Image: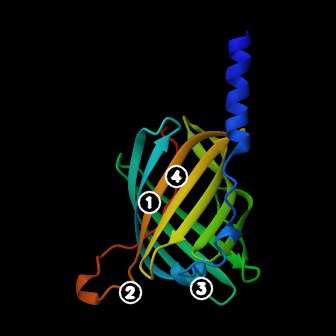
């Protein structure tokens, strides 16, 4: 019994201590990521999904197209999973002020909260993820880090009841800054889905 209690306490402490990284920690760093600018136009993405033990369970490529109207970013995403599944999502992301954003999507519960400082953008939301014929709520702690005008890296941690269930890593390539002769045909972004 003591061993079980010790294990439970260890898990709770590990997950509750969590990652104390905050968007404002990056306020003085460069390059500056302005999410509505970077995600406007066509983006190509590639990603892997890992389970809680770190095993890669799915891979995907994705095409994204974003349109900014001065107040809201409409982001259309198409995902092509290595197991043959295809998914789509449309984000509507509203800029509240220089550092704060709000977003909605069809499979997101309520409103996502976004925070932008320096090269970092953090997106917090609850996603409805299909698992074995039903949908479960998964909390996503989603970070995007701009590397240069073309490249960004996305790292998302997904939790259920405060316990990590999966991690997502995504590489983004903006096609806007690539010359026409070398531009790939596809464009994109990312999402995640636990293996059915």
| Secondary structure of residue under mark 1 | strand
Q: Is residue 28 above or below residue 193?
A: below
State the residue position of label 2: 177
Q: Which mark is residue 192?
A: 4
The answer for how far apart the CA atoms under marks 1 and 3 are is 21 Å
First in residue order: circle 2 vs circle 3: 3
- Quarter of the image for residue 36 reads bottom right
- Between 159 and 32, the residue placed more toward the observer is 32
Foreground pick, 71 / 163: 163
The residue where tag 3 is placed is 68
Q: How dense is the environment of label 4, judged by Cα within 10 Å: few (below 14), some, or many (20 and up)?
A: many
Q: Residues within 10 Å of mark 3 (few under 14, many from 20)?
A: some
Q: Residue at x 38, y 86 (%)?
A: 177
In the picture of the structure, the residue carrying the numbered disc 1 is 79
Query: Which element carries disc 3, helix, strand or loop?
Result: strand
Q: Marks 2 and 3, how far apart in space? A: 17 Å
Could you tell which of marks 1 and 2 lies nearer the N-terminus?
1
Looking at the rendered structure, the number of numbered marks drawn on it comes to 4
Residue drawn at point x = 47 percent, y = 65 percent: 153
Residue 193 at x, y = what percent?
Answer: 52, 48
**Mark closest to the chain's N terminus, 1 or 4:** 1
């Amino acid at each position: 019994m003591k061993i079980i209690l010790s294990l439970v306490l260890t898990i709770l402490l590990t997950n509750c201590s969590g990652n104390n990284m905050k968007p404002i920690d990056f306020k003085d760093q460069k390059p500056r990521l302005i999410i509505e600018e970077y995600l406007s136009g066509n983006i190509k993405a590639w990603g892997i999904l890992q389970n809680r033990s770190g095993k890669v369970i799915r891979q995907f490529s994705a095409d994204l197209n974003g349109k900014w109207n001065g107040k809201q970013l409409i982001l259309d995403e198409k995902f092509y999973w290595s197991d043959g599944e295809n998914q789509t999502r449309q984000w509507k992301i509203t800029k509240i002020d220089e550092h704060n954003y709000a977003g909605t999507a069809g499979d997101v519960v309520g409103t996502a909260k976004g925070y932008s400082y320096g090269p970092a953008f953090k997106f917090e939301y609850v996603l409805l993820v299909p698992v074995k014929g039903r949908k479960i709520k998964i909390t996503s702690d989603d970070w995007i880090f701009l590397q240069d005008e073309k490249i960004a890296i996305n790292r998302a941690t997904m939790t259920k009841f405060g316990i990590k269930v999966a991690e997502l890593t995504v590489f983004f390539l903006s096609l806007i800054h690539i010359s026409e002769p070398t531009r790939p045909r596809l464009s994109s972004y990312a999402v995640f889905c636990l293996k059915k």
